[in-house]
Each structure stands twice: as structure tokens, then as C-alpha cells.
């Protein structure tokens, strides 16, 4: 063993090497820190998107063509990409981060799914998913979707009019509203472990809104079964209303006499109403609803009254003050 | 700490401060900013502004606690980065959200409280950026300069409120910023109160 205080001359690092080494280390630190910062950024914007694959839906028919323009069943605007529809979702049951819903919903199990339909009906029934989907063949409906946050998409849904379900269960004359409920299962829906909203998510429609042919129960997009992030296995779509009315992963539909409670209006009654009809003239208290960002396009476009479905649904609201009933 | 080391640490901050911008530009040119790139650009530049504001405000407490006086030499760059990202944030909003329309930007600003508050945050940073040079500190005198630069508190508080106000429901992220900011401001308040007491008892001029 060498004595520590006896370092021979040839063991001392020459200054030139020492400084080179220092520069070398510094370059290393600089590069490593930049990589670390880059990785932190990547966490914020993860680029790798998992592939979304769901089964092909059997027997999708196109909506009756002769009446397309009049019914609003097929909007003539470029469809939003499958990629965007399945990776930009508001579905707080999985995540409050729109881009975090898809990864959080991977593997969501819908086996044995049941939907109970009861309340003020003559024939209440608990449907297995297959029974429910058998009520009517899925029609392709290409709808605009306007989120209350100010962005929009054009989505090719597959589904059938909600009214066809009512043909089966026969609401009584006392039924004035429809109340919907999403699955409550924090094990399968991790977002429900935090109390951002009062779970389970609930929504509602007035009877005449629910009977409107534009209101559909959707089970697919782009001809395939709904991916979990878009509301598998079955969801509501009401294209003239803000997106949050389209309740996802439905397990309960109840016909009722009084206006049911709805999740967002319960969360902030001054910001979100029961009707939530798309209306460019009535702003959200904190932001404008006059324009929207179409996903996949640049620049904002004007938002249309009832999301462009005024011709079809305007009559449902004649005489109503839409500023009060927002 | 040696001059040379300080220079290296400044270089570290300078390079790392540019990484988010470079990443955004890269992702934008590769069309991988997600489904709503406009929104992502606005959100991320805003977030960077807040991060740099918080870092700027952390310098003084850290320095006093650790006794590392050299930390103060990093503050200007951190503050200027906050201003830089704040300007980018506004430019993104002005171009991507308002389509370069001055009138629509102004009408929207008047209508939306969160935009007014955000504008205050950005506007108060302008005099701070202008007076950030050594020459300006000399010209103004340390005392006046320090008084002016307390506007950084206004910018940070307004910035966090601006963020909080537009979140739909999940306010956890803005609350994290608010909590960190509260600690940094709280530290200053405690120091101030501690110094104020003996100062009152002795001479008022002893206060620093």
C-alpha cells in the first residue's frame, strides 16, 4: 500500500488534462440535464400512442339517404381522424387529462354489461348488451360534436335512435324526462377514485328531446365497436347539445316525471345548465362560445346555433328563453 | 463559487430553458402536438411562464436558507425566461386562438376576466425585463430597483389566478402552483415581520 501523502510527480494530473476532463464532465452534465428536461417535456406530451383496436360492428347500415340533408343524419364536412377521436376525450371516469383518457382506459372490461331500463314504463327490463343492440341495426350517423370547452369534431357514429328503445319498454304518459347513469366502479374506472365530480355521472333529457330521431344510443365509431375512451360499450349522442350531455358507458336508463339531476349542472349550476344546447350567443361565464376549434383544422370557425341542427330541433325550444334555460 | 462555475451554471439554465421551446417546435414540425396543437402550444408556454416565475421567486429564499449567495446571479436569467415564455404564450393566443385579429383579441380580453388578469401578469413583467440590466440597476439605485421588482409578486399571483380560472373542474395543477407560490411568498412575509419588529423598537432606518 502506498502512503497517501507520498504522491509521486507522475501521478498528479497535468493541468491540461485536468481542464479537459473538467470540460468533458461539464459537457456531459449539460447534455444529461437537457435530456432530462426533454424527458420531462415528453411526459407532458407523450407521442407514442397505443393502437386502438376494437371489433368490427356487424350489420352497420347507412342512414336512410333520401332524407339525409333534412334529417341531419349525415353532415357533409370532413370527418375527424380516428386517431384524434380516440385520443382526445373528456371522460373524467378515467382521467381529467383529455390525452390521458386513452391510456387510462386500456383494458376496460365490458364483459357481461347490462343496462337496466325502468321507471315510468310498462315493460321495464334489464338488457344484456346484445339484447339492447338487437333492438335496431346500427346506422351510420355522421354528426358534429361540439365540446363546451370550445373545440369540435365530426364523428361517424354507429347507433340507433333512442326512441326505438322506448318502443320496446313503452313509457307511460307520466314519463316526462329520461335519466341516464354511467357505471360506478372505481376499480375499473380509476378517475372515480378522486372526487372531481359526484360519481356516478348522471345526465338527462326531456322526453321530446329523447324521442327526437337525432338522439341516438351509439355503440360504434368508424364501423367498429366503441373504444373504452369513447364510452364503450354504449353511450348517448345528442349532436345539438354540448358533448357532456352525451353520457358514456351507460348502465341505467330511467323514465321519470321530474327533471333529473345532471352531473355538470350540479357541479357548477351557473356554468352548465340542464339543456346545454349549443348556442353561440350564450357564452360560458368564463369563456366565449361564439367560435370553436375544429380538431384537425387550423383557425377557429363560428359555432352554429344548435350546432347546425336548428332546422331539426329548433321547434323543441320555441318560446323558451335560451339565456335562462342554457 | 468561481466566476467560471457561475458561467457554467448559467449556461445550464440557458440551454435547459430552451429545451421546452425546441421540443415544441420539433413536435409541431412533426405534427405530434396531439389532437389540439393550438391548445397545447398555448397551455405549455403558459405553464413554462409560471414555472420560471416560481423559480425566479425561489432564488431569494433558497439563497438565504443555504447561504449560497451566488444563486442571486441566476435570478435575472430565470426572470427573463419567464417573460420570454409569457410573450410566446400571448403570441400563441393572439395568432392561433384569435387569428391575428387585434379587435377580436381586445373584445375577448374585455369580456373575460381571466384574460384581463393574464394581461396584467404579462404587462407588469415588461418594466421588469427592461430594467433587468446592470446599467439600469445602477441608474435606478438598488432601493428603487428592488421596489419596482416586487412587481414580480404581482405577475406570479396574477399568473396563477389566470390559470386557475380557466380550468373546468380539475384544479389540482393550478393549486400546486398556488401552494408553491404561497410558501415562497409566506417565507418573505415571515422574514419581513421578523425584521420589522426589532426595527420598530430601535430605529426605523435599520430596516432593510
Image: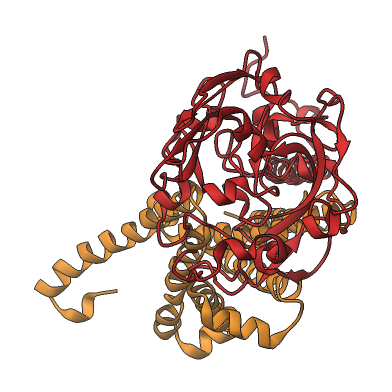
Chain colours: A red, B orange
Instruction: Give me the residue at 90% from left, 49% from top.
Output: A65
- Judged from this view, the residue extending furthest toward the bottom is B139
Q: Is residue B70 visible?
A: no
The residue nearer to you, when weighing B11 against A237, is A237
Q: Residue B173 location in percent, x, y?
A: 50, 49
Instruction: Give me the residue at 57% from left, 42% from top.
Output: A96
The residue nearer to you, when weighing A200 against A69, is A69
Left or right of B119: which side holds B62?
A: left
Q: Is residue A288 above or below residue A45?
A: below
Q: Residue A236 location in percent, x, y?
A: 63, 40
Q: Is residue B106 above or below residue B34?
A: below
Q: Residue A192 location in percent, x, y?
A: 49, 31
Q: Is residue A207 visible?
A: yes
Q: Residue B106 appears in which quarter of the rendering?
A: bottom right
Left or right of A325: which side holds B2?
A: right
Q: Residue A324 appears in which quarter of the rendering?
A: bottom left
Left or right of A233: which side holds B28?
A: right
The residue nearer to you, when weighing A21 against B194, is B194
Instruction: Give me the residue at 62% from left, 62% from top.
Output: A278
Amino acid at each position: 500500500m502506498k502512503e497517501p501523502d507520498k504522491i509521486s510527480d507522475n501521478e498528479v494530473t497535468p493541468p491540461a488534462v485536468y481542464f479537459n476532463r473538467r470540460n468533458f464532465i461539464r459537457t456531459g452534465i449539460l447534455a444529461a440535464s437537457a435530456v432530462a428536461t426533454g424527458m420531462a417535456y415528453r411526459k407532458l406530451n407523450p407521442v407514442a400512442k397505443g393502437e386502438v383496436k376494437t371489433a368490427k360492428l356487424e350489420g352497420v347500415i347507412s342512414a336512410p339517404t333520401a332524407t339525409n340533408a333534412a334529417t341531419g343524419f349525415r353532415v357533409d364536412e370532413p370527418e375527424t381522424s380516428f386517431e384524434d377521436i380516440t385520443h382526445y376525450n373528456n371522460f373524467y371516469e378515467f382521467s381529467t387529462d383529455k390525452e390521458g383518457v386513452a391510456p387510462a382506459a386500456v383494458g376496460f372490461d365490458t364483459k357481461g354489461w347490462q343496462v337496466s331500463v325502468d321507471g315510468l314504463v310498462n315493460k321495464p327490463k334489464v338488457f344484456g348488451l346484445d339484447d339492447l343492440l338487437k333492438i335496431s341495426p346500427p346506422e351510420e350517423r355522421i354528426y358534429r360534436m361540439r365540446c363546451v370547452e370550445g373545440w369540435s369534431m365530426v364523428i361517424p357514429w354507429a347507433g340507433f335512435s333512442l326512441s326505438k328503445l322506448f318502443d320496446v319498454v313503452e313509457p307511460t304518459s307520466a314519463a316526462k324526462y329520461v335519466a341516464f347513469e354511467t357505471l360506478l366502479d372505481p376499480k375499473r374506472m380509476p378517475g372515480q377514485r378522486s372526487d372531481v365530480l359526484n360519481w356516478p355521472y348522471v345526465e338527462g333529457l326531456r322526453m321530446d328531446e329523447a324521442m327526437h330521431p337525432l338522439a341516438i344510443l351509439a355503440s360504434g365509431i368508424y364501423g367498429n365497436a366503441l373504444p373504452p375512451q369513447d364510452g364503450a360499450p354504449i353511450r348517448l349522442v345528442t349532436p345539438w347539445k354540448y358533448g357532456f350531455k352525451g353520457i358514456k358507458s351507460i348502465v341505467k336508463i330511467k323514465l321519470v316525471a321530474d327533471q333529473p339531476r345532471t352531473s355538470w349542472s350540479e357541479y357548477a349550476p351557473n356554468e352548465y345548465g340542464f339543456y346545454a344546447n349549443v348556442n353561440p350567443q350564450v357564452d360560458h361565464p368564463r369563456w366565449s362560445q361564439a367560435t370553436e376549434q375544429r380538431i384537425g383544422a387550423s383557425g377557429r370557425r363560428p359555432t352554429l346555433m344548435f350546432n347546425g341542427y336548428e332546422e331539426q330541433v329548433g321547434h323543441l325550444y320555441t318560446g323558451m328563453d335560451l339565456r335562462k334555460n342554457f | 463559487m468561481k466566476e467560471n462555475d457561475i458561467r457554467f451554471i448559467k449556461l445550464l439554465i440557458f440551454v435547459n430553458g430552451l429545451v421546452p421551446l425546441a421540443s415544441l417546435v420539433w413536435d409541431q414540425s412533426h405534427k405530434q402536438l396531439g389532437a389540439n396543437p393550438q391548445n397545447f402550444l398555448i397551455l405549455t408556454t403558459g405553464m413554462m411562464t409560471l414555472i420560471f416565475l416560481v423559480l425566479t421567486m425561489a432564488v431569494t429564499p433558497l439563497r438565504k436558507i443555504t447561504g449560497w449567495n451566488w444563486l442571486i446571479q441566476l435570478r435575472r436569467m430565470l426572470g427573463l425566461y419567464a417573460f420570454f415564455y409569457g410573450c410566446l404564450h400571448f403570441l400563441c393566443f393572439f395568432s392561433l386562438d384569435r387569428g391575428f385579429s387585434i379587435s377580436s383579441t381586445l373584445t375577448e380580453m374585455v369580456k373575460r376576466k381571466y384574460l384581463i388578469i393574464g394581461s396584467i401578469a404579462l404587462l407588469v413583467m415588461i418594466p421588469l425585463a427592461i430594467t433587468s440590466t446592470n446599467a439600469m440597476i445602477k441608474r435606478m439605485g438598488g432601493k428603487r430597483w428592488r421596489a419596482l421588482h416586487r412587481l414580480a409578486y404581482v405577475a406570479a399571483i396574477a399568473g396563477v389566478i389566470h390559470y386557475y380560472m380557466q380550468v373546468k373542474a380539475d384544479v389540482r395543477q393550478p393549486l400546486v402552483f398556488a401552494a408553491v407560490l404561497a410558501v415562497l411568498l409566506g417565507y418573505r412575509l415571515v422574514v419581513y415581520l421578523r425584521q420589522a419588529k426589532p426595527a420598530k423598537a430601535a430605529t426605523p432606518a435599520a430596516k432593510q
